[in-house]
Amino acid sequence: MTLQITHHPETGRIEANVDNNLCYIEYRLQAPVMHVLHTIVPDAVGGRGIAGKLTEFALDLARANNWKINPVCSYTAAYFKRHPQLEPLRT
């Protein structure tokens, strides 16, 4: 599945619309730390790897800006546990 992901820095969101369902990561930036607060994927489109793709986008954004990530969100914290090689990005 190709996912069109859009970054909205003015609202602290990374969004994708899947089958008319808004999926997003909400974050707060306190440079150089990106606090990932929520990852939301409605049940209607769950199980398609959307949360993972949104998280990868957030990680790429953090790398590009030399930010660290504080995984407040339980999904993001679990993602870091599943991918220990990402630990250098974590605060």
Image (spheres, rainbow, N blue to C red):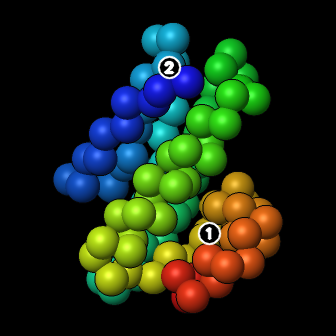
The image quadrant where one finds the C terminus is bottom right
* Quarter of the image where one finds residue 41: top right
Taking 54 as reference, is 70 above or below it? below
Taking 81 as reference, is 4 above or below it? above
The image quadrant where one finds the N terminus is top right
Q: Is residue 83 left or right of residue 8?
A: right
Residue 36's spot in the image, x, y percent?
Answer: 52, 64
Residue 55's spot in the image, x, y percent?
Answer: 54, 54
* Residue at the (30%, 72%) spot, across then down: 64
Residue that extends furthest to the left in the rendered view of this protein = 10
Indicate the amino acid at tag 1: Val
* Residue at the (55%, 77%) spot, across then down: 70
Task: Check disc 2: other Cα within 10 Å, few if <14, some if 14-19, many if 20+.
Answer: some
Residue 19's spot in the image, x, y percent?
Answer: 51, 11
Residue 49's disc number: none
Taking 14 as reference, is 83 above or below it? below
Q: Which residue is mark 2?
A: 18
* Residue at the (26%, 47%) spot, across then down: 8
Q: Is residue 80 left or right of residue 5?
A: right
Residue 28 at least partly seen: no
Q: Nearer the viewer, mark 1 or mark 2?
A: 2
